[in-house]
Image: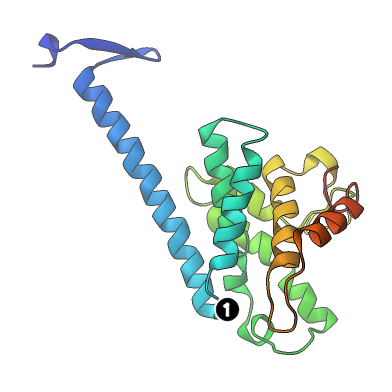
Amino acid sequence: MIAHQPYRALGKIYCSEHCLLKTRDACARQEDMFNLLAETLVKALDLREHETGLHSKRVACHTLVLARRFTADPAVLQQIYWGALLHDIGKIGVPDAILLKPGPLTESEWGELRTHPEKGYQLISQIPGMVEAANIILCHEEHYDGTGYPRGLSSNQIPLGARLFMVIDTLDAITSDRAYRKGASYDVAKTEIERMSGSQFDP
């Protein structure tokens, strides 16, 4: 029985080494499950947008690299990674006629597309353990000077993870090849990001 096994404190709870290891295994399995869920949701969005998913994975990995300059907390870093990876998941709720439209969008169509952060938040905030990631999704289109959407947040009202993501998302957009143009250099991206410091980006 458990009475003959060595005991160890886990916060205010005491359990055997066997119990402790089982708890750690369960936590690891839960994290793996969340990672698989996040990657599956991104693939589901790719099926609708006919994309490869490389953008979402790139910005998630690069946002994580930047985030490590600000925190070493693995729980915070995990939430930032999930938030960056799933930033556009709300586009699943945008009609195909808008999401896949080959030409310019009308003002009303832009209004519908701009609902995607809230739709993404509504989806992901229902998942226990991903609430902070959901807040990053909700705020990833906010601007430091308050001119973004959906809530017009500014400065430190915007979660750190979302502020970090904005820089990386712009870096990726400028330096990546598109069907209509070739990606610019990192020096060009750096100049543009510095120009928007204090307006779109946290200085």
Circle 1 crowding by C-alpha within 10 Å: few under 14, some 14–19, many from 20: some
Apparent side of residue 149 relative to residue 178 in the rendered image (left or right): right
| Depicted 191 relative to depicted 103: above or below | above
Residue behind mark 1: 49
Classify mark 1: helix, strand or loop.
helix
Q: Nearer the viewer, residue 138 or 70?
A: 70
Give the quadrant of the C terminus. Answer: top right
Q: Please tell me which residue is depicted at 85% across the width and 53% down the height of the picture.
A: 200
Give the quadrant of the N terminus. Answer: top left
| Depicted 163 relative to depicted 124: above or below | above
Where is residue 81? Give x, y as percent: 56, 48
Where is residue 33? Give x, y as percent: 37, 50
| Depicted 108 relative to depicted 3: above or below | below
Q: Is residue 42 visible?
A: yes
Q: Please tell me which residue is depicted at 42% across the width and 57% down the height of the picture.
A: 37
What scheme was used to colour the molecule? rainbow
Q: Nearer the viewer, residue 94 or 198?
A: 198
